[in-house]
Image (cartoon, rainbow, N blue to C red):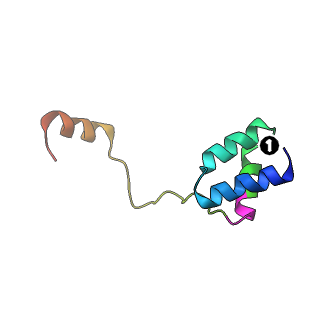
Amino acid sequence: MQERELRDLIAEVKDGRLSRRTFVQKMIAVGLTAPMAGMMLAHSGVAMAQPRSRTSRPRPAAVASSRFCFGRR
């Protein structure tokens, strides 16, 4: 892959025309690792994924399924 092609792909991610996931998949296809592709995007000013919020906790499966079965909310 030529430098110009790589810069074009990064520009597409910045513009929202290409997802970060697709970019990483394309980089893996040409032999880069996923962390390296992520570093390239970060270096280019593309925001990284937001970390998961610690305030939202998933419900235990038993509670969620009983509420589903018995219609409780």
Task: State yes or no: residue 65 in magenta.
Answer: no
Residue at image location 25% in from the left, 35% down from the top? 65
Label 1 environment density (alpha carbons within 10 Å; few <14, some 14–19, many ≥20): few
In this rendered view, identify the residue nearer to me: 43 or 35: 43
Residue at image location 54% in from the left, 59% down from the top? 51
Judged left or right of residue 46, residue 6 is right
Q: Secondary structure at mark 1?
A: loop
Quarter of the image containing the N terminus? Answer: top right
* Total numbered badges shown on the rendered structure: 1
In this rendered view, identify the residue nearer to me: 46 or 2: 2
Name the magenta segment's main secondary structure: helix
Q: Measured from the top left, where is residue 30 in percent x and y?
A: 80, 38
In this rendered view, identify the residue nearer to me: 41 or 59: 41
Tell me the residue that label 1 is attached to: 32
Q: Measured from the top left, where is residue 8 in percent x and y?
A: 74, 54
Judged left or right of residue 54, residue 22 is right
Residue at image location 19% in from the left, 40% down from the top? 67
Judged left or right of residue 72, residue 49 is right
Q: Measured from the top left, where is residue 35 in percent x and y?
A: 73, 49
What segment is highlighted magenta in the picture?
41-45
Q: On the image, which quarter does residue 25 sit in?
A: top right
Task: State yes or no: residue 44 in magenta.
Answer: yes
The residue at the far right in this view is 2
- The reply to whether residue 39 is visible in this rendering is no
Q: Amino acid at mark 1?
A: Leu
- The reply to whether residue 7 is visible in this rendering is yes
Q: On the image, which quarter does residue 16 sit in?
A: bottom right
The residue at the far top in this view is 69
Residue at image location 72% in from the left, 45% down from the top? 34
